[in-house]
Image: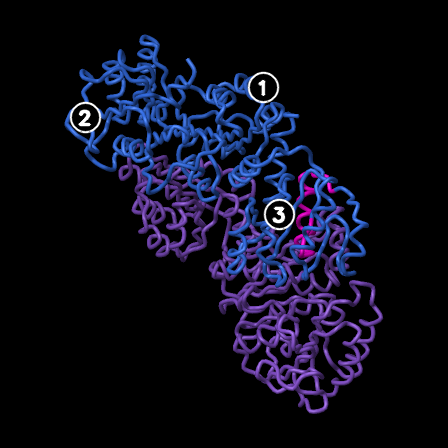
Chain colours: A blue, B purple
Amino acid sequence: MSLELFFNPRSIAIFGASRNAEKPGRVILRNLLQGGYGGEVYPLNPKATEIEGLKVYTVQDLPDVDLGIFAIRAELVPGALREAAEKLKAALIISGGFGEVGRNDLEKELLEIGEEYGIRIWGPNCLGIMNSHANLDATFIPLERMEMPKKGKVSILSQSGATLASIVDWANMKGMGVSKLASYGNQIDVSDYEILEYFAKDPETDVIGVYVEGLKDGRRFFEIARKIRKPVVYLKAGKGEKGKRAARSHTGALAGDYRVYRGVLKQAGMGEARNLEEFMNALSVLERWRIRGKRVGVVTCGGGFGVMTVDAAEENGLELVELELKNLRKEFPERVVLGNPVDLTGDATPEMFERVIEEIKLQVDAIFVILLFQLPRLNERIAEVLHQHAELPILIVSPPGEKANRFNSILKLPVFESPEKAVGAFRTAYEACSRLE
Amino acid sequence: MSLELFFNPRSIAIFGASRNAEKPGRVILRNLLQGGYGGEVYPLNPKATEIEGLKVYTVQDLPDVDLGIFAIRAELVPGALREAAEKLKAALIISGGFGEVGRNDLEKELLEIGEEYGIRIWGPNCLGIMNSHANLDATFIPLERMEMPKKGKVSILSQSGATLASIVDWANMKGMGVSKLASYGNQIDVSDYEILEYFAKDPETDVIGVYVEGLKDGRRFFEIARKIRKPVVYLKAGKGEKGKRAARSHTGALAGDYRVYRGVLKQAGMGEARNLEEFMNALSVLERWRIRGKRVGVVTCGGGFGVMTVDAAEENGLELVELELKNLRKEFPERVVLGNPVDLTGDATPEMFERVIEEIKLQVDAIFVILLFQLPRLNERIAEVLHQHAELPILIVSPPGEKANRFNSILKLPVFESPEKAVGAFRTAYEACSRLE
């Protein structure tokens, strides 16, 4: 069985569809209904007859369903699962209170039931699952705090539920198109590598992001990762000694030696984001472009930002090629510095940026374009200019500002607040693409 | 003479107050008038009689003034300066087209005139000067692109004009209180170290930021820097080989060996920001707090963010102390992890954060507080809770998000988008304070 029953269930039973509107089971029910999930939904609650306008079921009158979602107290989960086992094909256990607080006995019981009845078990102790293409929001974060993402092709798996929630809200702010989201918790049965494999084969997924503290089975993960024909970006937390200890308290993960992880994941052809922001930024680059190489050009209207971009590019191992620019010398005033960076100086216009891009686009794999909207001759037209040439990766650096934000908001490409962020996102995306050619 | 005539001139003459509303001299005139500058302003322009509602002067009818601002073609500056020399005490040369394009002869001429008449010369080839406390905006960025900052106590000197403009707009977005801003250009006379010394003595300056590519006289700069009794944060651009070359094209600066610079500036007790964002963030920390030490505590509602914060703290050499927390064990549910980080988990409330802060505030020099506003029980009350304890540095990490931004906008303390940013800002601020005790 693949994980299709989790990401595309035709019907769902919710154990713990509470009368209290704030309880996780009730929030999940509401998210499914308000999110527009098209399958059948069966709330279960021994103390109620109707919830959110739906008839409440008992296990006895429940029909066969694809997925049971459990959001009841940990001690009650094994009993409930066993009772309903004949009617379920898969179980998503949201509830916490299992291995992470020492109740490994409850986990063992769940596994035994799963094996006996052929039920795959996801979790326990997780945020849940989202599939925007199925309008499926099976997480317990209410929509007022985190909406279903825009449909898209980025899928993310995360060992941390709260981190995933933050990622989703951040992605929504960026307007990133998302496909599937998976918080897998204690992974007693369904494992990180299995979800990765599912994403690898999923036709609705083009780009994969992985937040991980420790892997369940590093070798299996590596074997799957190295065969994926899609860019994968990962973020590893729990790097130092204290970080590893914190990871152990958090997910019980043996965070392992960071250098070993790093070596293995890079060898598998994954791109390493150094922090969560770089992770988000790299995904937003990959959502739009595949990176073919690391020969880059820099075009700026401010010399200082040009220098900072070159510093970052050098530090990240990018190749600042010698640009062939002699055609431009007669067109541009003397103060314009024709090198790499090209420094158009403070009088730069959108038309000057356009001419440089036309001239260098065949010479590089990507262009870093630095826009300082304090400068008076830079205006809205630059949005069109850059968009028209965006078959090539164009990474815009434009710092935020009281006045600058008005311009930044109309740019039609990803905008990075600083040279280091644009360069870091690019390097990560490049790493993630380097084995795909 | 100190630099008082530049930062607090009682009267200003503008050479190049053009009839064209977009020319630099005209923009400066408008900025002075609209900014509310209280001194006398005398526009000069041989081709006009009235500009911006002011009578236009000739050198002949010009009275004695403190500061002459020159925004005319480079070749014309020496002649104009000489003609008006008897009536000026100081000269700010905005115009470019001097040493940076090989016209060192013009600079030599300016210096000779300055020496002959006892006129200090600022520039040429610079953005200009701001002093919010004097409502003085003597830059050529129009107010529609960059407003006068809120009055405050952060002063910044920058070798790059466009970078400074971006910094100001960014500071305005952050609501940072700014005192004085100095873009010094080719520094043929007034030098970086002299401005630094002026800021050191200025009663309206409590915190100093320095953007530098190469110093005019490293030894002098160091001698002044090490005696300053105020925190100083610097950002050095032009680090690698290509970066140094780009700096040379930009400001003509010999960027020098980065490691040497770094050693010297750190030895002088300055805090090094690794990039422009860290520079901004460190200044916003120092605007509010002096950092007494590097013993830190971490309180989170999401385990993953706790791990990432610990990673960053370890990498930056902060001390994650063993927190004494036994009083809290009976108050908090079992799932709460009482370590460093304290992980309140997904049910965290403002009240729980408050209890932890009360308990640990005497044990640490600063607290990192991680807020994930996707979690349903975190609400507006947290703003008050944190604000009430903010005599201690409290560094809030709250990632941006479609829904989260509503909460982030009401927090009354600096908010950092990621653990790494909060930690980096803190480390820089700590370095900048470490010699002040």
Mark 2 / mark 1, whichever is N-terminal: 2
| Region rendered in magenta | A299-320
The answer to whether mark 2 and mark 3 are in CB contact below 8 A is no
Q: Residues within 10 Å of mark 2 (few under 14, many from 20)?
A: many
Q: Residues within 10 Å of mark 1 (few under 14, many from 20)?
A: some
How many angstroms separate mark 1 from mark 3 (CA)?
35 Å
Element type at marker 3?
helix
In the displayed image of the protein, which residue is found farthest to the top? Answer: A116
Give the residue pinned by disc 2: A56
Q: Which mark is residue A227?
A: 1
Give the residue pinned by disc 3: A386
Q: Is residue B330 visible?
A: yes
Q: Are marks 2 and 1 on the same chain?
A: yes
Q: Given this view, does label 1 or label 3 mark the residue nearer the observer?
A: 3
Q: Amino acid at mark 1?
A: Lys
Q: Which residue is painted at 81% across and 56% down in the image?
A: A330
